[in-house]
Image (cartoon, rainbow, N blue to C red):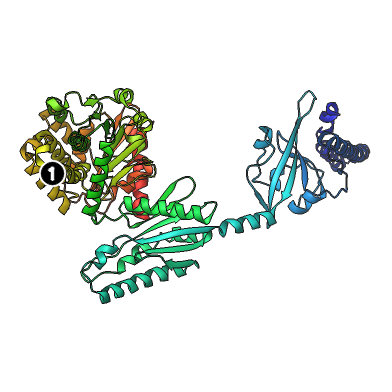
Amino acid sequence: MNKKLGWLLWPNLWVFFLVTAGFAVAAVMTENYIMAAVEGGVTALLGIYYVVCRIYRRRELQQYVKTAFGSADIDNGADTPFPMVLVRLGDGSVLWTNDAFASITGFQDKYLHQRLSSVLPNLSLDWLSSGKTEYPYDINIGDRRYRVYGTALRADDPEGTALGMLYFGDLTELYLVRDEYIRSRPVVSILLVDNYEELIKNLTESAISTLNAQINDVITSWAEDYHGLLRRMERNRFLLVFEKQDLDRAIEGKFSLLEDIHQVENPSGLQASISLGIGVDGVSFEENYNFAALSIEMSLSRGGDQAVIKDRFNFNFYGGRNRENDHRSKVRSRVTSNSLMELIGQSSQVFIMGHKNADLDAVGAAMGISCMCRKKGKKAYIVLDLERNVADRLLDEILAVPEYRDTVISGQDALLLSDSHSTLVVVDTNRPDQVEYPPLLEAIPKVCVVDHHRRAAEYINPVVVNLHEPFASSASELVTELLQYAVEKSDVLPIEAKSLMAGIFLDTKSFNVRTGERTFEAAAVLRQWGADTVEVKKLLQNDFQDTMSKYQIIKSARLYRQELAIAALTTPTSRALAAQAADELLNISGITASFVLYPEGDQTIVSARSIGDANVQVILEPLGGGGNTATAGAQLPGCTVKETLDLLVTSIDQFYET
């Protein structure tokens, strides 16, 4: 049968029919009636022959389809359960259809060849040609939704003609049930007034009751639009359960509760802020609640005042554009210090690791943890690449101190020295992909984290001891607070105090940004322990050539949105110079945020700073970056500076337009 397929698909004779008819008409017009009669007779015979051949061809084609595709019900008037159509894959020509297909598509069996695209313009046949048996998308025909299945067959004729039989399954009712199931899936949300303790501080019971009523009114008014179940679990914590279809509306509304809650103020003028942790797509209410609890933790670790959605795969963030309000507690620092000292005492040895290309803050924080280890009589190793860092001056001074001559080691050496009783303390980062030597993170089971950056979607887990405060100016500030509860003044070496002060100096830009009461308290303690601010200032100095290079970067910057400065470099530079140039750009009047882009190997680095409303951490997060509202950075492997610049501009536009 396959060998006859080429004959079954031979072209129609309508072209020849029209040509002979045209000759007959021409003969009449030239008054050659005998010729016209002959040509007319030939045309009539040709027409009859065409019809007979077409009927016979159709029967043979039906028989072929029945044999090749195993469809026993195919016949001229067969009423099959599924709409079916036979097409030629090369050009999409329709060779045969059943009545059900004609009914749903309006296809008319004409004498002229038609293509499938004439009735289903959006249905491609590439999937069938590539060997697949199911179209990857649903198609809409009228008000019904169909799933398309197919079978392909290549004939044995010389041309190797390829045919495809398509079957249309009407799954409209199933899709309606599925869509309703998806829309009605439960969503569990935890609402937390994250600065509640500050709001009620020093208030009378009457004022607290009034404040609680205002908070309840705002939250209840917002939740009513989502037809869910709202219950107050604690003084500052609410539980809201609603349906998935309403979550989409909340996202479209940009979680207006985040702004509405700012209307509530205590008598001293402090505005309330709220965090939303949302769990979705879990297999049960319990799993959704666990997702919501993780989302709340993520929101608070990123500064609060935002909504975080957690599903089975990742986190999504909304809001978080405002600057964080410092509401840390010294109690947590004391408890963390005691826990960390106890863990150090139980360890065989301690490894301290910061982020890649360690800066003064990472080194300073590592020195502080090393001091705690020495107090407990435990050997500490600082894992650091001496070739790739931006703290070489400080490291030269550290390595000259007898207590630290064999302390700084590479990641490979640390991996060889580690054992099952070792402890790893990660400072100045919370992302596993940003640590100095990731294999060490996987090899040591007991991991502690001390960091001040806003928490990323991917973070180090599990953690035995975690001090994560996005409100702190630097990791060195956090470690200084830990030291106050763990050691005496005589236990701290001058180089350790200097290193910690240098870390605070770097991340606060000499106490100009992200400083709070706790920052100056930490600096005062370090000053008492022997830190010399003049010596620290010298660590931040540049030589003449670097200074000129920095100002060349500043000169290349261009304005965007009238308040953002972007410098896109085509030649490599050092990370320290790029960061300093970004800082220096903020000294220009009217500039509220700056971005410096430069190539480094096969990747592009972005260094960002802000002193205005632009949250550079939120801007760089879509690019895989991180940091905090005032200082952030990103690394884009495989991207050119031009491509990175386009991505950055798109992210900036999204930040300002949402």
Q: How many marks on residues?
A: 1
Viewer can see residue 642: no
* Image location of residue 477, percent across then percent down: 19, 45
* Image location of residue 302, percent across then percent down: 32, 50
Vertical side of 492 occupied by 330: above or below: below
Q: Is residue 117 left or right of residue 307?
A: right
217 vs 92, nearest the viewer: 217
16 vs 224, nearest the viewer: 224
Mark 1 lies on residue: 510
| The image quarter in which residue 632 lies | top left
| The image quarter in which residue 270 lies | bottom left
The kind of residue tagged 1 is Ser
332 vs 625, nearest the viewer: 332
* Residue shown at the point (65%, 41%) measured from the top left: 124
Q: Is residue 592 left or right of residue 311?
A: left
Crowding at dot 1, Cα within 10 Å, few <14 / some 14-19 / many 20+, comes out as some
Viewer can see residue 217: yes
* Residue shown at the point (84%, 40%) measured from the top left: 71
Quadrant of the snapshot with the C terminus: bottom left
47 vs 378, nearest the viewer: 378
* Image location of residue 488, percent across then percent down: 12, 42
The secondary element bearing badge 1 is classed as loop
The outermost residue toward the bottom is 206
